[in-house]
Image (cartoon, rainbow, N blue to C red):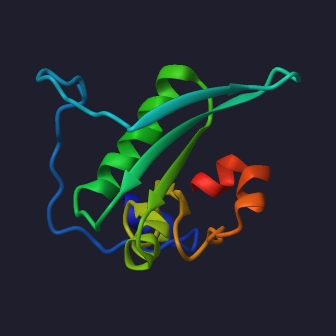
Amino acid sequence: MFPRALRKLGITFPDPVAVSFLPTDLTEIRPLERRVDTLLRFDSADGSGYLLAVESQSAQSKAKPSAWAYYAAHLYAKYGLPPVLLVTCQDRATERWAARPIDIGPPQWATLTVRPLVLGPGSVPVITDPEVAAADLPLAVL
């Protein structure tokens, strides 16, 4: 019924050959260790705010995209604030890899898209002038 109904709306899912009921309880019964490198809460004068989860990524990792999706969903559910995932990279290849959007869901309809804000050698200028560095220490550190 699901694929057939959506086809009438212009969204095509393949016809299933099998459908199975799965448990609806999504409670974790085993300890699940998930840690971001740094987590900051930003509150604005207008009452809005957001979370900044910072991750340092030194190489590509098959496990990181699902971990980043977990972080974003968990932080939003726990704090009720929009999370920003900032990934810092030391090399251009890791930076390009980390900057790709992570679509979770079938190709026809991603349920969740994680778009990290990525900073690395391809997006942050190298500051070599001591005066320029002294004028903007946070940028110089990055």
Count of numbered badges drawn on the protein: 0
Please state, as top left, top right, bottom left or bottom right, where the C terminus lies in the image. Answer: bottom right
Q: Nearer the viewer, residue 117 or 16?
A: 117
Q: In the rendered image, which quarter is residue 2 located in?
A: bottom left
Residue 33 in percent (x, y) is at: 21, 30
Residue drawn at (31%, 33%) of the image:
35
Q: Residue at x 19, y 25 (%)?
A: 28
Q: Residue at x 47, y 57 (%)?
A: 88
Q: Nearer the viewer, residue 60 or 13?
A: 60
Is residue 30 shown above or below 94? above
The vertical placement of 79 against 82, above or below, is above
Residue 65 lies, with reference to residue 39, above or below; the image says below
Residue 94 in picture, x, y percent from top left: 38, 72
Question: What is the x, y in percent for residue 32?
Answer: 19, 29
Closer-to-camera residue (58/11): 58
User: Along the horizontal axis of the image, is 15 left or right of 11?
Assistant: left
Name the residue at the left extreme: 30
- The image quarter containing residue 108 is bottom left
24 lies left or right of 113: left
Measuring from the top left, give residue 49's x and y in whole percent. Answer: 72, 28
Towards the viewer: 29 or 128:
128
Task: Return the residue found at the far right.
Answer: 46
